[in-house]
Image (spheres, rainbow, N blue to C red):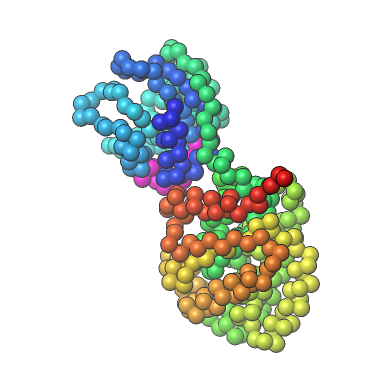
Amino acid sequence: MDSIQQCVRLLHHQVGTIIKISKLYETPSWGFESAAFFNCAVVMHTQKSAKKILKDILRIEKELGRTRALQSGYQSRTIDIDIIGFNEEIVESENLVIPHPQMQNRLFVLLPLQDVMPDFIHPILKKKISDLIQDCKDESAYKVISDLTLPLDQFSLEKYNYIAVEGNIGAGKTTLVVKIAEDFNAKTVLERFADNPFLPKFYKDQSRYAFPLEMSFLADRYQQLSDDLAQFDLFKDFLVADYHIFKSLIFAKVTLTEDEYRLYRKLFEIIYKEMPKPDLYIYLYQNTDRLLQNIKRRGRSYEQEIPAEYLDKINRGYLDYIKSQTDLNVLIIDVSDKDFVKNQQDYIFILEAIQDKMPKKVIL
């Protein structure tokens, strides 16, 4: 059982976020005489390809002491990790076949799978998991040994109710919000920046289009937050947003003239009083060089000419704002040397930082 739990931990930290885990089952050895097998199934969220996952799990098997012998056939091993399914995809290659070609013949696969995916349908056989179990010819005895610990249970992010994730252009705030929402079953509020008709014009002629751009952003953010937050119960629902309305003032201070900003701030302060404040405000900090790389990589044409000086000003604006907020629960995470999309350990680092920021309850 310790090997199983250690394997689950490594998968969660190195491959993808494990969101479900089955009970631990004991079954007789399969294909040779040996001690009983212990089996479980997990459901994982990951951005990796099936080929990359296979490479990762072979490395984990080796780390846990498995040595693959050259002879064919079944052999005793400390751990054996198989990819049973990959969304509804069908993969047939020399080293990998998905769905697993023998899954329908093995109760030690089907029973744990039913625990975590009771609605699973085999993408080739077009059978529900309940029908696969009923039709299975495997008569091996099996028994449930225990429950297993879900790694995600160490995090209780939903206790925040409302988290706002902020960052400079290209910092990855929307990507992080979507990942958290998927893993923790949260509702999202995502900024509708792509619909703003002034944005491409602004990047070509900032002095001319700064004021209408910032005013349109403010109006849209206010309307969206008012509408979306009204749908949720901030005492019960878990909500994650990829912006906080205060960003309007930060960008306006950078882009507007002094007179324009003075007028803008009067309008903003009227609106800001009505807005619910997040339980946690996260600022993803990235250095300017990394921001420029991200902007270039995502390829939005109207962003490609953004100067480094403009990004520097935005960063300073955010940091100055954060220093002034004494009643806001703020968490700054430096992600300049991290990639929480491709590197699962970097994502876990962020989750741990959020968890550690949670107020502690003290009983005296």
Q: Position of residue 145 (x, y in %)?
A: 50, 21
Q: Is residue 54 visible?
A: no
Tell me: residue 161, above or below residue 293. Answer: above
Looking at the image, which is closer to me, 241 or 312? Answer: 312
- Asked whether, in this view, residue 292 is left or right of residue 352, the answer is left
Instruction: Name the image quarter holding residue 246.
Output: bottom right
**Residue under the point 79% across and 65% down:** 274
Q: Is-magenta flag for residue 29?
A: no
Q: Position of residue 304 (x, y in %)?
A: 46, 73
**Residue under the point 65% across and 86% down:** 257
Q: Quadrant of the C terminus?
A: top right
**Residue under the point 31% across and 37% down:** 62
Q: Look at the image and give the residue range highlighted in magenta.
A: 43-53
- Asked whether, in this view, residue 72 is left or right of residue 151, the answer is left
Q: Is residue 227 visible?
A: yes
Q: Quadrant of the N terminus?
A: top left
Q: Position of residue 7 (x, y in %)?
A: 41, 35
Q: Position of residue 349 (x, y in %)?
A: 49, 52
Looking at the image, which is closer to me, 250 or 34? Answer: 34
